[in-house]
Image: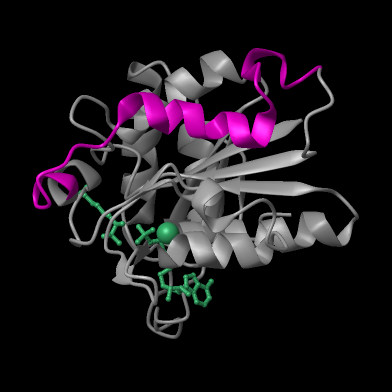
Amino acid sequence: MEVYFVTGTGTDVGKTYCASRYVEMRRRTGLRVGVYKPVASGCIPGDDGDWVAEDAVELWRAAGCPLTLEAVCPQKFAASLAPPQAALAEGREVDEMELLRGVDAWTGPSSNSAAENDARFDVLVVEGAGGLFSPLSASQLNVDFARTLRERLPPLKVVLIAPNRLGVIHDCIAAVRAAQAAGVGIDLIVLNRIASVAESKDHSISTNAQQIEHWTGCPVVEQWS
Ligand SMILES: Nc1ncnc2c1ncn2[C@@H]1O[C@H](COP(=O)(O)OP(=O)(O)OP(=O)(O)O)[C@@H](O)[C@H]1O
Ligand SMILES: C[C@H](N)[C@H](N)CCCCCC(=O)O
Ligand SMILES: [Mg+2]
């Protein structure tokens, strides 16, 4: 089973967009793809009175609606804040055990043997919340969760999404070095070309990938395929 933890140099950088395109591409090859958003904030009210995580809906649809939307994103909060603050605003907490337990729905009960056992899915794509160093729960940043997840799912690869614009070289070097210091290697950097960036004025776009690869030693792509 291939497992990817999709994180970013921040929020709104294209994690869901790039992950969803990747999920669709892998599905087109006939693979069974699972998607998991451990916790979401900034959710909107749904028809049944529950909160809806738009990220989870986008990922779920890209994967062909496997299992249930609840399995995609078991923990949802309303405020557009980091998840622990959004939970606190509702007098609740992010359940750290549930963050990990939620993976089992996608990898099978003994997630340690996900690589060996006949897991329900061939590929699992997990999207964090915010950036790699955004708080995920009261005691964990996204990077801490990625490290724990990799201990449980050794094939896990960490994919860093960064918007292709002037300033991204710094953001990627900082993220890679901080991740390494936190015991997490970055396996792939995806330079996401967000349509809003005025390409004509940003002359860095054509050289950012080569610069980031040079300074970080990480593979950098503009298209995650
Ligand atoms: N390459 C792209 N082309 C067109 N639109 C894009 C692209 N990348 C991102 N977007 C759009 O930009 C917005 C932010 O992207 P997205 O929601 O994927 O960010 P995110 O990092 O997942 O944010 P969050 O931290 O809230 O999860 C979305 O409306 C998304 O559809
Ligand atoms: C609400 C937003 N769309 C994301 N889900 C959460 C972003 C948290 C960022 C926290 C931070 O690092 O400042
Ligand atoms: Mg997202």
Residue 71 in magenta stretch: no
Residue at the outermost right position: 30
The residue sitting at 68% across, 61% down in the picture is 65
The colour scheme of the drawn protein is: one colour
Q: Is residue 206 visible?
A: no
Q: Would you say residue 114 sits in the magenta stretch? A: yes
Q: Which residues are magenta?
A: 87-116
In the rendered image, residue 9, in percent from the top left (x then y), is placed at: 35, 48
Report the front residue among 98 and 85: 98
**Residue 105: image location, x then y, percent:** 61, 35
**Is 50 on the left-hand or right-hand side of 92?**
right
Is 117 located above or below residue 138 in the figure? above
For residue 107, above or below residue 84: above
Q: Nearer the viewer, residue 141 or 69?
A: 69
Judged from the image, the quadrant occupied by ligand 3 is: bottom left
Q: Residue furthest front?
A: 48
48 vs 104, left or right, is left
